[in-house]
Image (cartoon, rainbow, N blue to C red):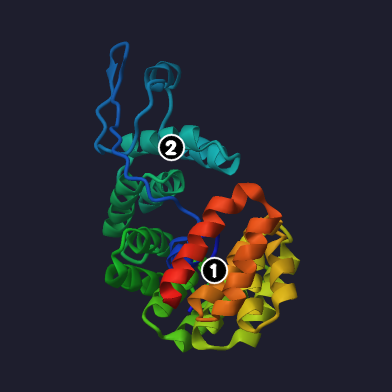
Amino acid sequence: MSKPIKSITSVNTLAKMACAMRRAVCCLALVNTTVLLVGCGAESMEIKPKITGLYDDKSALVHDIQDMTIDASSAMSRANRFLQQGNKDEALYYYVRALEFDDQNPETFEKIGQIHAGKGNYEPAEAAYQMALKLDPKNAHALEGLGLIQLNTGKQAEAKQSLTAAVTTDPSLWRACNGLGLIADKNGDYVQAAQHYKSALRTKPDLPILMNNLGYSKYLSGDLQGAMQLFDAASKLDGKYDSAWLNQGLVQARLGNDAAAIKAFMHVLNEADAYNNLGYIYMMNDRTPAAYEYFQKAISSSPTYHKLANENLNRLHAMDN
């Protein structure tokens, strides 16, 4: 059975849609990057960072010379201002500077974790979140951030524990709720998954990804009509949200609405890709005559598509025999 997705990179990846969907939830890329904190001297003043592994920037020496009079309060103020402006590199620098004066503030570690997670630097992000939680075990944002990293690195049991603790402390954390929904879907508990997605929607009622994920859960539970309504709602909120259109095409195909499926696919794909997608869905659902028909249409509509569609036809022949 074909499954809905969050994004698609190849028209021949429909069999892997559910995995791609689960990997997308939290808006963070999984990149393990090791970074080192640079401690630089300025004139007669020696900076001796208490924390390592959270910062690496060749411009640090310039900062140290210019910021001789900085203290914990001004460092935090500058860091927060830069973060609000979207300048994460400068924000990170000043958060780490703040730690040189006060390494007992959990918010500083939480912000450092947030920045590293946003950059895809999961190793230092996890270390920073753990430091924040050591100082404040109920820091909801640190629990959420840690849980999302654990989810994306395959530590499902730990992720569930961290995310549950996060929403227990602060039920408005929609990313944590969304992550718990993904875990429940993976475990086949679609009722629980739906509850988590609905909790997230109470905080972010107009977020397409949450509607898409709730639709995904309904699809897995067999509620195709319910899934279709949610995918449609997600695409209406954001007409450029590709996953909602691709998922609509999938559900329309499962419902036997070929024209509607092709129309939905063509919001994202060209005509040949749309036909090939539909053929692939039918091949995976044992609708052999329809699969042949749409692979042939894909070949006819685009000579450059000939190779991929023919590969699918050869696979279909092998399955049919």
Q: Amino acid at mark 1?
A: Tyr
Whether residue 200 appears in this view of the structure is no
Which element is circle 1 on?
helix
Q: Residue at x 68, y 57 (%)?
A: 300
Crowd band around label 1 with a 10 angstrom C-alpha radius: few (<14), some (14–19), many (20+)? many
Relative image position of residue 78 (x, y in whole percent): 52, 35
What is the three-letter code of the residue carrying label 2?
A: Leu
On the image, numbered disc 2 is attached to which residue?
92
Q: In the drawing, does residue 136 fall left or right of residue 234?
A: left
Quarter of the image with the C terminus in it: bottom left
Marks 2 and 1 close (CB-CB < 8 Å): no
Horizontal side of 41 relative to 11 (left or right) equals left
Camera-nearest residue between 277 and 138:
277
Q: Nearer the viewer, residue 79 or 237?
A: 237
- Residue at image position (31%, 69%) is 156
Please say if 7 is above or below 3.
Answer: above
Which numbered mark, 2 or 1, is in the foreground of this view?
Answer: 1
Question: On the image, numbered disc 1 is attached to which residue?
Answer: 280
Where residue 200 appears, x then y in whole percent? 55, 73
- Above or below — where is 49 with respect to 165? above
Q: Is residue 119 above or below residue 274?
A: above
Mark 2 packing: few (<14 Cα in 10 Å), some, or many (20+)? Answer: many
Residue shown at the point (49%, 70%) measured from the top left: 178
